[in-house]
Structure formats: C-alpha cells, structure tokens
Image (tube, rainbow, N blue to C red):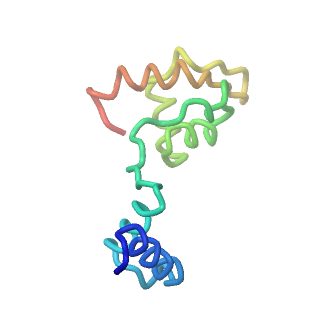
C-alpha cells in the first residue's frame, strides 16, 4: 500500500512530464502546491526601485505613466506635473518621484 507522500511524489512526477499547455488549472495548482511553490497573485503596487530618478522628454513621461505619447503630451500641457518638470528649450527633464506624487494627488479629479 502506498503512503500519501509516495502518491504525491508519483503524481508530481506525472504532472512534471505533462506539457504545460495540456494541464488544467487544477493540475497546475496541484503541481505548485506539491513542489511547495504556491502561486502568488501579481502585486498591484508598482516596484519603485526600477523607476529611474529622472526621465527625459515626452517619451519618458509616456513610459513613466504607461500611456501613449499623445496622452503624455496632454498631461504635460495641462500642467498636471508642472512642478516636476524642468525644461530648457526643447529638453524636458522630469523628476519621477515628484511627478508620481502629483499624479497621485490628481488621480481622483480627472482621468486622462
């Protein structure tokens, strides 16, 4: 008679040999629980360590906020992040921490 541990090991071996594309969601979660690697949902919070101190230009603003260049241009033009922007002629430098803080304050009023 097999023990519960042996049955789990055998089941894990069978699941590991199965292509991922052919697994059901239940089989995938079972394999993860057997291997001790529980599935964690993606975090809603953005990882701020990967954000640079400054971004440059409209393209940088678009990448910072995850929007199109047209929307980034509108954000700049409307003055939402005016305090975070330093511009000399055509060079735009944006302090990312300040810009994110200003957008967080603005978030409840108007969407872009």
Task: Indicate whether 4 appears above or below 81.
Answer: below
Can you give x and y, in whole percent of width and height, for residue 12 in the image? 46, 74
Can you give x and y, in whole percent of width and height, for residue 89 in the image? 73, 24
Can you give x and y, in whole percent of width and height, for residue 53 in the image? 66, 24
Instruction: Name which residue lies at 27% across and 27% down.
Output: 108
Looking at this view, is 77 or 108 the one in front?
A: 108
- Which residue reaches farthest left? 109
Q: Is residue 52 left or right of residue 42?
A: right
Can you give x and y, in whole percent of width and height, for residue 101 in the image? 45, 20
Q: Is residue 59 left or right of residue 28?
A: right
Looking at this view, is 8 or 77 the one in front?
A: 8
Q: Which quadrant is home to the C terminus?
A: top left
Instruction: Name which residue lies at 67% across and 21% down.
Output: 87
Q: Is residue 7 left or right of residue 62?
A: left
Q: Which quadrant is home to the N terminus?
A: bottom left
- Which residue reaches farthest front? 1
Task: Indicate whether 66 appears above or below 92.
Answer: below
Q: Is residue 37 left or right of residue 26?
A: right
Instruction: Name which residue lies at 51% across and 23% down.
Output: 99
Residue 33 picture quarter: bottom left
Labels in figure, total: 0
Instruction: Name which residue lies at 61% across and 38% down.
Output: 58
Looking at this view, is 9 or 98 the one in front?
A: 9
């Amino acid at each position: 008679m097999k023990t519960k541990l042996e049955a789990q090991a055998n089941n894990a071996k069978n699941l590991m040999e199965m292509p991922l594309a052919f697994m059901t969601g239940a089989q995938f979660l079972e394999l993860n629980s057997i291997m001790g690697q529980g599935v964690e949902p993606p975090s809603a919070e953005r990882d701020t360590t990967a954000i640079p101190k400054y971004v440059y230009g409209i393209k940088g603003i678009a990448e910072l906020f995850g929007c199109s260049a047209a929307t980034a241009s509108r954000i700049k033009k409307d003055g939402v992040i005016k305090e975070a922007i330093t511009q000399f002629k055509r060079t735009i430098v944006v302090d990312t921490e300040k810009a994110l803080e200003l957008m967080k304050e603005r978030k409840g009023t108007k969407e872009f």
